[in-house]
Image: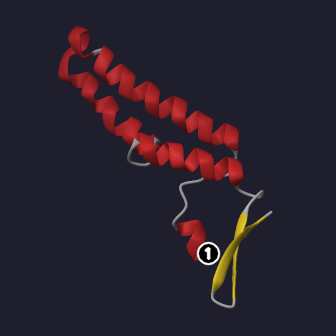
Amino acid sequence: MPTTEAKRSFASASVPRHLARGALGFGSLAAAVALFPAYGPVTLALAPIGLLALRGCPMCWTMGLIETISRGRLRRECTGGTCELKR
């Protein structure tokens, strides 16, 4: 069972996996817009795929990238009513 912190996280299991999700997401969104003049509204079906890969929005993906990179390097410890970031 994942912890509460892991449930709220946008991070992926690894940086390459996160970058692959970003390539799929941004690529799908770009293709949906770029191919629209040539193939019409049917290309807009790529947009939900892109948003799903990005977990909702490009900013969510960016936050997840930062979390993925920092995972294992920094952690928050709360003791005695105060919280600190520790290596």
User: Measured from the top left, where is residue 5 in percent x and y?
Assistant: 58, 71
Q: Is residue 64 above or below residue 50?
A: below
Q: Residue at x 32, y 23 (%)?
A: 32
Q: Residue at x 62, y 76 (%)?
A: 1
Q: What kind of element bears circle 1?
A: loop
The answer to whether 75 is drawn above or below residue 25 in the figure is below
At 69% from the left and 73% from the top, the residue drawn is 84
Which residue is at the front of the view, 9 or 78? 78
Rendering coords of residue 40 (x, y %) = 19, 17
Could you say which is closer to the camera, residue 86 or residue 18? Answer: 86
Q: Position of residue 47 (x, y in %)?
A: 32, 33
Residue 12 in view of the camera: no
Count of picture labels: 1
Q: Is residue 38 left or right of residue 15?
A: left
Q: Is residue 14 visible?
A: yes
Q: Nearer the viewer, residue 9 or 32?
A: 9
Disc 1 packing (10 Å; few <14; some 14–19; many ≥20): few
Of all residues shown, which one is farthest toward the right?
87
Q: Residue at x 45, y 34 (%)?
A: 25
Does residue 50 sit above or below 80 in this rendering? above
Find disc 1 in the rendering and name its residue.
3
Please name the amino acid that badge 1 sits on: Thr
Check the picture and name the quadrant holding the C terminus. Answer: bottom right
Q: Quadrant of residue 19?
A: top right
| Residue 61 in the figure: left or right of residue 82 | left
**Hey, which residue is sitting farthest top in the picture?**
38
Residue furthest out toward the bottom: 80
